[in-house]
Structures are given as structure tokens and as C-alpha cells.
Amino acid sequence: MENYFNTGKKELCNGCGTCALRCPKSAIEMVEDGEGFLYPHINKEKCINCGLCEKVCSNFNKSEQESVAYIAINNNDKELKNASSGGMFYILAKYVIENKGVVFGVTYDEDLNVIHKYAETLEDCKQFCGSKYVRSDLKNTYKEAEKFLKDGRVVLYTGTACQISGLKSYLGKEYDNLILCDILCHANPSPKVFKLYKENLEKKYSKKVKDIRFRSKEIKWGDERTLIELQNDQVLYEDTFKNAFGKELINRRSCNFCVFASKSRITDFTIADFWKIEKVKPDLDSTKGVSLLTVNSEKGKSLLNIFKNNTSILEKVDIDVAAKYNHFSNVPAHKSRDKFFEGIKKGSINSDNVIDVMNKYTRVSIVKKILRKGKRIAKKVLRK
């Protein structure tokens, strides 16, 4: 079976690092390439050709689970406000913490690098709420999760499907006390581009960036802007990085060939925004956010019965209908992706101009704007 080790094709590696963690001779190091993504590098002098790296490669979707899809909204307004969509993550986290468990999620470190870490209190779990549109550094969380599981504690591990596939491959066995939840993922943007973006903002405004919230609900869910908080509490809205991510300009190569972008999920739960909810349930007030929740395992079904009372709405929906409007399939890379990253590698795209260049490549042309407006007008006319 093809993998990164026997082909060298970057589209076959999602960067989970399981191979490096499981190598018996520590012969594999995860090395950042010119685009800012990690790939395994084998030290030939240490390698004993055991083939374990290929055996534990996690870039395969082996799931045959039948998922059940739901429209879901958290019934706690405060928790809902802090979430990117319908607040389902916090319900899961609350259940685990109340059972003296541990929650793994994605947050920022003190330098606004996006990382995985664990929390043991509900207050600490709040840092995992909200979207972080950057490939997270997994740190030592696979090993930490394994230790907590062996100690008998309930563990909730959240991340992208490829990251969770890496954890499953690393563990090598099933655990009754492990709950897996993936975020329905559009793609993994480059940490290197994100770093340049932050530096460009700091040069432009002559102030340090304190926080970035990609999905601020200051207006309403569905109309979110990227909120940038600078020193001295200055706040601005700047969507360049988010737009480049959404238009597939700055994302990992494997994301365009993702084996996990399907209705066959490898986790107990999958959480996403329920885009186009107005087409599925037009009478629903969706301004505060709505989740698409899929339950993918018997464990997930049992847990759902426990915490369903924490939802204001939990309504089954045909998964084919949900998949029609949400990210259950691959999308092609931006036509200028390789050209953009070539500029990153050469240094011609840097912290002085990365915002301008991303805007240049993702700006909607006047012709497309006119065509879109024409389609909207035509639809209104047809409805009358």
C-alpha cells in the first residue's frame, strides 16, 4: 500500500508524527519543510529497516461506521456565545471533567503558536473553544493521553480526523475510557504562514498581537469576522488569513487528498458548523450558532443519551443532506498555491508583504462579484 515512506509523496503524509514516536531506534525526526509543515526524516545510520514506520502510518481511513447526524445547539447561552458554532464541544468536556477526566484540545501558547494540550478543569477547557485555523503542534499529547488512559482516567481527545487517526495508531489498542471527537476539518493551514501573518500585523500597526479569534460572533453566527486584539486593547477585524485558508491557498498538500473527508468517520463524535441550516430547517433561529453533530459509534450513542438534556435542540437529520452542505469531501488546491509557497520558500513573500500577497491571490474579481449579484437577483425573482 502506498505511503509517504515508499513513495515520498507529500500528499500521503498528514504530519501526525506517529512514526517518529513509535520508531524503536528514535531514527525518525519530524522536520519542517519550506512551506512550514512537518514531515518525517529518517536517519539512515540509526534505521534498522524494521518497517514499523510504514505499519503505524495513520494516513488511512479504515472506518466502516455508520454515522447518525443531528442538528444540535447547547442550551447554555454563555457556553454557546464562546463557541464557534453550536457549543457541543463544551457539553462533551463538561461530562468528562465531571467524571474526573482529562480533556485534550487546541489552544494558543504565550507566543500565539497553536498547540495541543490537556485540561483538568472546566475553566481550563474554555481555552479550547473557538476555531484556530492553523495546523496545531501535537507536542507530547499522544504519550500524555496514553498515560492517563492507563491510569484509568476518562480521556476526551479532540482534533482533526488525521490527528486522531495518529493517536489511535500510536495507542495500538482500544480503550473503553477514551472518547474521540474530531472537528469536521476544511484543511490545515501552514504555521509558518500564520507566523508571518502575525509579524506583518505587528509591523503594520506597530503593536504586538495579543489574541486572534477567527470566528468572533460579534455580529452573528455565519457572519463572523477575524478579531485581532493588539496591545493597549486595540481591536480590529482582519480576515486575510482566514480567507486564504478558506480558498485553499495556504493549506497542507495532504488536505486536498484527505482520506478522512467522508461520511465514514473514525471517531465517536464529529462536530462541525451546520452550514446552510436555513435550507434544512428554515424556521430555526440560527443567529447564535448551530452545530452539525454526527454520532459515529456505539460508545457515542450511549454518551449522547447521557448529555442530550444539555441541548436546546437535538434533531436527527439525513446525513446525506448534511453532507451536501458541509465538508465531507475533498476540495482542490488554489490554482496559485504552489506559486505562493514558492515565494515563501524563496523569502520573496515575508513578514513585510504576506498580507498583501494573500489578498492579491484571494480577492474576488469584479466580474465574479457581478455574476454573484446577478444570481442572487435571479433567485429572488424566481421566488416571487
Image (cartoon, rainbow, N blue to C red):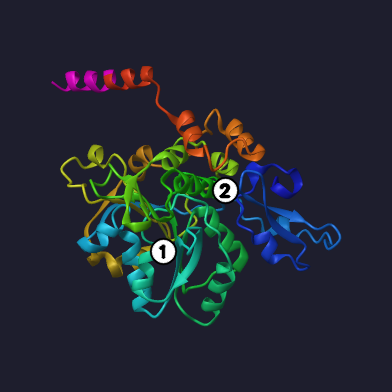
Q: Is residue 293 visible?
A: yes
Which mark is on residue 192?
A: 2
176 magenta-colored = no
- The three-letter code of the residue at mark 2 reads Lys
Which quadrant of the figure contains the C terminus? top left
Spatial distance from mark 1 to mark 2, Cα to Cα? 39 Å
Between 107 and 257, the one lying in front of the other is 107
- Dot 2 surroundings within 10 Å: few (below 14), some, or many (20 or more)? some
Between 32 and 321, the one lying in front of the other is 32
**Splitting the image into 4 quarters, where does residue 341 fall?**
top right
Relative to 168, does residue 254 appear above or below in the rendering? above
**Where does the magenta region start and end?**
374-384
Q: Earlier in the sequence, mark 1 or mark 2?
A: 2
Between 247 and 309, the one lying in front of the other is 247
- The three-letter code of the residue at mark 1 reads Glu
Q: Main secondary structure of the magenta part?
A: helix
| Residue at numbered disc 1 | 298
Position in image of residue 223 (x %, y %): 28, 42
